[in-house]
Amino acid sequence: MFELHPRLAADTRVLGDLPLCRVLLAKESQYPWLILVPRVAGLREIHHLAPLQQQQLMQESCAVAALMDQALAPDKINVAALGNLVPQLHLHHVARFVGDKAWPGPIWGAHPVIPHGPQVLAREADTWQTRLGTVPGFTPIYADE
């Protein structure tokens, strides 16, 4: 049975589900940051997915990246599956801008995390759920907060 890794659960807010992936919003306020987590129990690597699931993951990742590109017009969208601290497969989608705090380097460890306040996080979640509503197969999940 699929369960979200505790660290992902603590560091993000659930936005909803695509056909394969749960979509998360990072609580980090310094970068627009969405995360896709395939809802497959025990999954650690992309190549562990069945071929059709690999294709679905790529389609969902591209849809999220295109949505971020359209909504934010970033200079670059970084897509990464690191998993050094969280072994559960998850794909980061981070909109980067020339002049952001970590530009042009990686965001990981560049600066201390500054989380969204609860009200800002709720507004960001609502905004992203509305945007994601244009992606075929997206089903929002509303927080109890």
Image (tube, rainbow, N blue to C red):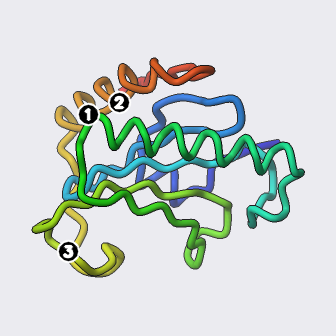
- Secondary structure beneath dot 3 equals loop
Tag 3 residue: 103
Residue under the point 28% across and 56% down: 28
Q: Nearer the viewer, residue 51 or 49?
A: 51
Label 1 close to label 2 by CB (< 8 Å): yes
Residue 126 placement (x, y as % from top left): 31, 24
Label 1 close to label 3 by CB (< 8 Å): no
Whichever of callouts 2 and 3 sits on the residue coming sooner in the sequence is 3
Q: Residues within 10 Å of mark 2 (few under 14, many from 20)?
A: many
Q: Is residue 49 left or right of residue 74?
A: right
Say which quarter of the image contains residue 77.
bottom left
Q: Nearer the viewer, residue 46 or 140?
A: 46
Label 2 close to label 3 by CB (< 8 Å): no
The circle on residue 128 is 2
Residue 5 placement (x, y as % from top left): 62, 56
Kindly identify the amino acid type of the residue bearing the numbered disc 3: Trp
Residue under the point 35% across and 51% down: 33
> In the picture shown, does residue 34 fall above or below 22?
below
Between the C-alphas of marks 2 and 3, the distance is: 24 Å
Q: Nearer the viewer, mark 1 or mark 3?
A: 3
Q: Is residue 91 left or right of residue 77?
A: right
The circle on residue 142 is none
Q: Nearer the viewer, residue 21 or 119?
A: 21
Tag 1 residue: 124
- Secondary structure beneath dot 2 equals helix
Kindly identify the amino acid type of the residue bearing the numbered disc 1: Glu
Residue under the point 78% across and 58% down: 43
> In the picture shown, does residue 102 fall above or below 54?
below
Q: Nearer the viewer, residue 47 or 114?
A: 47
Residue 140 placement (x, y as % from top left): 51, 21
**Viewport quadrant of the C terminus:** top left
